[in-house]
Amino acid sequence: MIATSISAPDALERHPRVDVADVLRGFAVMAIVLIHAIEHFNFYSFPPTEGQSVWLNFADRAIWDGIFFLFAGKAYAIFALLFGFSFFIQDDNRRRRGSDFRGRFCWRLVLLLLVGQLNAAFFTAEVLVLYALVGFVLPLVCRLSTRALLILAGVCVMQPMCLWQIARAAADPDYTILAFDTSSYWAATFEAQSTAGFWETVKVNLWEGQLASLAWAWDHGRVFQTAGLFIAGMLIGRHGWLLECNLPKWGRVLAVAICCFFPLYGLNNMVGQFVANPNILTPAKTLLSSLANLSFMLMLVSGIMFAYYKTSRLGSLLDRLRPYGRMSMTNYVTQGIIGSALFYHWGLFLQLGITASELVGIAIFMVQYAVCRIWVNHHTHGPLEYLWKRATWIEWPFGGGR
């Protein structure tokens, strides 16, 4: 089955830039910075809290729980959704000009893998390597019909591996789920972050850190969820869901997401009281948390869509995130570099509590934002975005041409 894309009066017309997509990207990267800051950029080392005031202990707890509830597993999901959306725009623009973008996109993923390795040298929990690997699903399925893609995306977000593990463990009491033992890898990265110099930290991050990060992504359902979100983002682009004319559809999305989130969130917190078998409990919690995060992410996206298009004050405030979103790759990579330089042993090795760390995260965002506001006044792309685009169109025999 071959799908058709959004109709256009002129076959050579390009899709205009969708401002709300940049707003969503900016929101997602901002949220990622705030999460990573309180995690010390995946370096879970904090000063003792004995002797802290009651109010500071309360602030630490409130910030940690609040930031994770609002953004953990959701900011990354928005980023993944928009990755699929961007692929559709690029692919459909080339299709309208009579060329095939799929080969170029595969090369673009190879380049993304290299950028991800640069990021991983500083920060062990980066996602660009995962995106580069999972992203090959997009050129494989992009010509399928909407119905086929909806089914495929649904299968992915329902975590088929988790469902298989639950069914096997329920049918066979002796069945043990396969889980990667990454404790030695995480121990090596923690040791390097705590005591090593720059080059030793880079070496450990690029080997033990990458293996631990990718294994974590597999164990926590991120591989299938990412594939599903990529496909969903492509469908959002195909049917113009980020345009204001399709805003009523987001109202239905919001209603369904609200109805789904609270039962899923509650079940995820309660399931351990009723399921004792770890071979059932572990995949069940992965499935429930994945779906709960997906539901909350859709609530966030729907809310941003309505706020951006329907409320002048909030819309104007959100619109200020556009420069930050236009440089999302640059901001995502540099936040890891800055964070590791602040918190790891090779850098300043700051020993800060959660509240102070979050203030550092806000400061990182504000500095990046100020740079973005200046940069976009003189350039159409951020530095890494520009290099990625230029390298994408190097004249190699991939077909599709310019």
Image: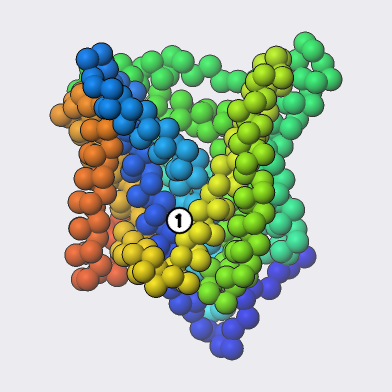
Residue occupying image coordinates x 51% and y 83%: 13
**Vertical order, 5 against 199 (above or below):** below
Q: Which residue corresponds to the image point at 67% horizontal and 39% vertical from the top-left?
A: 263
Res. 95 in view: no
For this orientation, the residue located farthest to the left is 348
Q: Quadrant of residue 194?
A: top left
Residue at 67% over, 54% down: 256
Q: Is residue 295 above or below residue 304?
A: above
Q: Quick check: 182 left or right of 151?
A: left
Residue 172 screen position, x and y as percent: 82, 16
* Image position, residue 94 (x, y; %): 52, 73
Say left or right for 183 vs 284.
left
Q: Quadrant of residue 276?
A: top right
Amino acid type, residue under disc 1 in the picture: Arg
Give the percent coordinates (x, y) of residue 377: 22, 71
Identify the secondary structure beneath mark 1.
helix
Return the residue nearer the eye: 93 or 74: 74
Q: Please tell me which residue is depicted at 62% across the width and 41% down the height of the picture.
A: 262
Q: Which residue is mark 1?
A: 108
